Amino acid sequence: MEAPSQAATFLEGEARALLTRLDRVKPFALHETMVPAAALAPAAQAAVESFLIRGRKNVRTQVEAYLSWLTGPGRDAMPELLQRRFALLRQRFNEVLTQFDLFQEAITQRSEREIGVWLSGLDVAAADALAVPGTVLATPIPVACYLDRGPGGAIRRANTLIAGGRSPIALIRIPRERMVGYGIGATLVHEVGHQAAALLGLVGSLRSVLYDLERRSRHPAERAAFAYWGLTVSEIVPDLYAVGKLGIAATLGLMAVVSLPRRLVLTPVPGDRHPFPYIRVRLSCAMGEALCPHPQWRKVSDLWTSLYPPSRTPDELHGLIRALEASIPRFVSLLLRHRSTALRGAQLSDLMPRFTRTPELLAARYRSWSRQPSLMRAAPPTLVFAVLGQARAAALITPEEESRLLGDLITHWALSSTLDAMTRCAGGASEPLQASNRGGQSWRRSGLSPNPSSREAGFSSS
């Protein structure tokens, strides 16, 4: 057999083998088992399935085109050309499978007992955190959460360019270790903040302002400070978003993440887009104080400084810390007053429900909920996170009670949203659920509505 023919025969077999592998990639709806309350929201499920169907179809078309070329004009081509084209095809094939595997990992977890339902409840909380009426954030975006190892969360934003097109949903990764207390909400809303910042064009517009301040500054220390804020603003905006939505719960959750060995907390990593932990927590407290003034922010900031006193750092690093701390008031004011085109004339601070997130009001709401627990189930998820975080900060609730309540509420959000979706799919028919109620099952006792619309279930924007 001549070399070109031998190469063509070999590569034809390899390409046909790719098709057999592609045939084993089935829609998730055919092979993922989970209770209904753990499933993705219908919009997210449809978006993911459509994205993967298009990807598989495109890859199949490319493989079949390669086979046609291989058995036709390419039959006598040089082996090197045959292999080069096959290598590119295989790369494309692997990219599509990588996308499938990532979504599969996120969806397969929903078959796990309890965890699956929690993930569905966190989807509801993420959607609530993202919604802001009167802005581009008012348009719902499909969201899905999943768990992974490691200390930090992450998000693949919706519409991000990936292999096969653009990401059809916002996919949020939450570390397993963060599934406790206020750490859940703090991580979730920070990652949602990345999506909000992208949709509102905040990072680019803020970075332009900060770089301009850096250039115009006459003092080296101030210039260094605003250069640093410009470098790290992509993580600072989500931190602000979390503080605005959750109050002190966001800062306490951040502290739990970055409570690391002293060297890692007080030393900046060159080129890192995250502010180094010491200054990041100090900035979070300053943002909270600016949004909802209260002595608690100073107490938490002083606590953090006592845990990691910066006075013993080398002179050069201590100088940077002093410069950053001196610039924080001006920087926070700039953040809150910032306007991007997508904000339509509003300030960044206007995105935050700060008048319902004051420490006094959150503490009062917790006391009211303690007397009437049904009110807690009717509240928006981000408000629940904020209230329980404030109660924990004020020692009104124990860590054990906080975790138990959050577990119950996250499960409630998943079940309530599932019943809502079922009702819509049934064309609004609610008689079977009402009949169940008459048959002795007390929806009132369980805190669930037989026809839980988004307003009744408390899932309107906060």
Image (cartoon, helix red, strand yellow):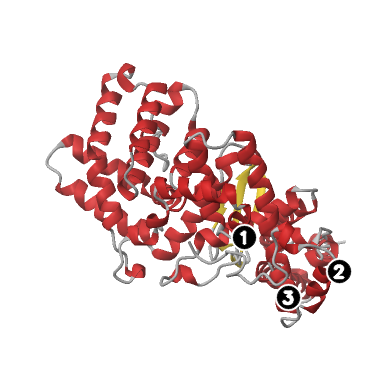
Which dot, 3 or 2, sits closer to the camera? 2
Mark 1 Cα shell of 10 Å, populated few (<14), some (14-19), many (≥20): many
SS at mark 2 in the image: loop
Going by the numbered disc 2, the residue's amino acid type is Gly
Toward the bottom, the furthest residue is: 427
Residue under the image location 40 percent in, 46 percent down: 360
Residue farthest toward the top in the current orientation of the protein: 312
- CA–CA distance between discs 3 and 1? 17 Å
Query: Residue 439: which disc?
Result: 2
Q: Position of residue 30 (x, y in %)?
A: 84, 66
Q: Quadrant of residue 37?
A: bottom right
Image quadrant in which you'd find residue 56: bottom right
Question: Mark 3 Cα within 10 Å, few/some/many (few <14, many 20+)?
Answer: some
Q: Which mark is residue 124?
A: 1
Instruction: State left or right for residue 254 relative to residue 113.
Output: left
Q: Position of residue 115 (x, y in %)?
A: 74, 48
